[in-house]
Amino acid sequence: MVAVNYVGEELWSYFNAPWEKRVDLAWQLMEIAEQLTNNDFEFALYLLDVSFDNFAVGPRDGKVIIVDAENVLVADKRLIRQNKPENWDVWYESKFDDCDKEACLSFSKEILCARVTVDHNYYAVCQNLLSRHATWRGTSGGLLHDPPSEIAKDGRLEALLDECANPKKRYGRFQAAKELRGYLAQLSHNVR
């Protein structure tokens, strides 16, 4: 027996929504990535299957919800700090995967479970949902495709998305994700 619950339209149905809505959804996705990575419980929840079909948007409140969490890795950061495996305190940067399939991610479960500071969730959201590298159902460009001309001209959004998906600087994804969250909050008026 399987029980299912309708929680809203899948994220994919918002791919061509108005710009303001897509920015709000992108901000929420980055906030989810942050909360799953860094929280008071000291458990990191790493999403291993990130695609437009694994998220939905609530019909009443417009909140992004994870609807398919069958591929999640749980890392106990307290235990990692206690056991101190090799390189436990060295920041881990996920490797960009420029594959020719949809929703590709490369990761090492062993490393995700042995490091305290990991950028996997930012990488997964940026590469597979937000940036120009995101491909799904024959489309490309990610949720933030075709920004308004003033934002495209400015270049900041594209630079942050590129650095978040495929960093050029050491630990660049960590900084880009932080700046991207702030920039999206500003664009969507979700400033806290």
Image (cartoon, rainbow, N blue to C red):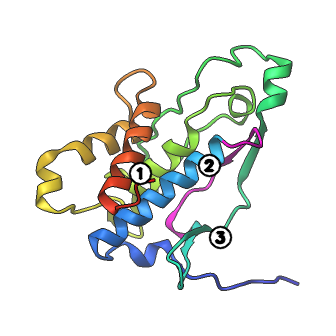
Q: CA distance from mark 3 to mark 2?
A: 16 Å
For mark 1, give the secondary structure.
loop
- Say what amino acid the circle numbered 2 marks: Gln
Is label 3 in a helix, a strand or a loop?
A: loop
Task: Point out residue 6 in the picture as x, y percentages from the top left corner.
Answer: 65, 85
Residue drawn at 40 percent across, 54 percent down = 191
Secondary structure, mark 2, is helix
> 146 left or right of 192?
left
Q: Are marks 1 and 3 in contact (CB under 8 Å)?
A: no
* Discs 1/2, front: 2
Is residue 150 at least partly visible in the picture?
A: yes
The segment highlighted magenta reads: 39-53
> Does the CB distance between marks 1 and 2 fall below 8 Å?
no
Q: Nearer the viewer, mark 1 or mark 3?
A: 3
Q: Residue at x 33, y 48 (%)?
A: 183
Q: Which mark is residue 67?
A: 3
Please tell me whether residue 42 belongs to the stretch shown in magenta.
yes
Q: Viewer-nearest of labels 3 and 2?
A: 2
Residue 50, image x, y percentages: 56, 57
